[in-house]
Amino acid sequence: MADMPQDPGQDRAASRSVDEQIFEGRALGSKLRLTLTNVPRAEAEIGWRSVVDEFDAVDRSMSAYRDDSDVLQLNGRAGQLEATPVDRRLYAAVAMADRAWCQTGGRFDSRILSVLQVLGRPGIQPVRIPTQETWPTPSGIQRDPRRSAIAISTSIDLGGIGKGLALRWALDRLAGTLDPIGRGGLIEAGGDLVGRGPGPTGQEWLIGIDDPDGGSDPVAVVGLASGGLCTSSIEVSSWTGPDGESVHHLIDPRTGRPGGHGLKSVTVATADPVWAEIWSKALFLAGPEEIGPEARRRDLAAWWIYEDGALEMTPAARQRLRWP
């Protein structure tokens, strides 16, 4: 996703009315991009380093793809009832996953790592399957906030909220840079982003919702004054499963299989990028028949694309629509 003019064919350079600086790199398996408006160069470079540092810290804490991550160490203790102290970022992530499980009726569930391993997802570290058959909490997570201690019933995957948390914390670290009136910032990590302050036109950020079929033009452009916007799509991470079938990373905990059949992508905007990420996944797993009623009932700004390419949105999302 990227900021863009209301008319996708309009000359972007002509629409700029403020000073803009862009930094790009990679983090958490995605392109990382920071756009700053009206920020002096020296401060902008410091801000970029703080964003990169935060994403690196989240990677060390939560990655399922590196054998030295904190979550892999926690997974090694899965099934043990005694909670053990963990890194503050990891504690916050597991606590958020626990709340997300409750808020989404179990559709967001971090206990899918073993399923991804069985389906042959490339790159993940081997998962330990615990022998513990009973657990005191239905979510499979026990927390002791006084000691920042965690116990888990089975191995967990925090990829479903890692980027959202990295975006939230990176924006917090940019607070001093963005505090002066008239300054703005947008952090993008793949299909997830968070913004604050004015965009390059001096007004809200204009965000294109990507075509899940890979087209160069967005399917819609939405306005973002502040907050997060995240997309879940089967195009992001798909591979051939052990039986030769095409599978993807959005696992329905109710079936233990990839879910959301009939949908191609779901985008959600909320004040907090973490909840935007959570709800984009939970709504995707609601499927094409339930997504509309669920999103409207929760008054979410949500856009979704069906397998036939049709775009639908909630009333809250339509208020943010800038094109078409």
Image (cartoon, grey):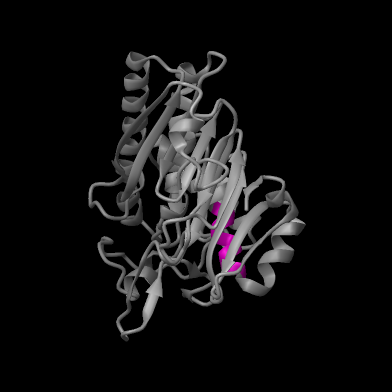
Q: Is residue 163 above or below residue 111?
A: above
- Type of secondary structure dominating the magenta stretch: helix
Q: What range is drawn magenta here?
A: 278-286
Which residue occupies the foreground of this view, 62 or 52?
52
Quadrant position of residue 245: bottom left
Q: Position of residue 301 (x, y in %)?
A: 67, 50
Q: Position of residue 81 (x, y in %)?
A: 45, 55
Is 30 magenta? The answer is: no
Is 283 magenta? The answer is: yes
Can residue 33 be seen by looking at this rendering? Answer: yes
Which residue occupies the foreground of this view, 15 or 49?
15
Q: Residue at x 70, y 51 (%)?
A: 318
Can residue 138 be seen by looking at this rendering? Answer: no
Q: Position of residue 220 (x, y in %)?
A: 57, 53
Q: Position of residue 7 (x, y in %)?
A: 56, 45
Which residue occupies the foreground of this view, 223 or 46?
223
Q: Residue at x 51, y 20 (%)?
A: 183
Outermost bottom residue: 243
Is 242 on the left-hand or right-hand side of 262? left
Which residue occupies the foreground of this view, 202 or 238?
202
Outermost left residue: 67
Quadrant position of residue 64: bottom left
Is 37 on the left-hand or right-hand side of 78? right
Number of marks in picture = 0
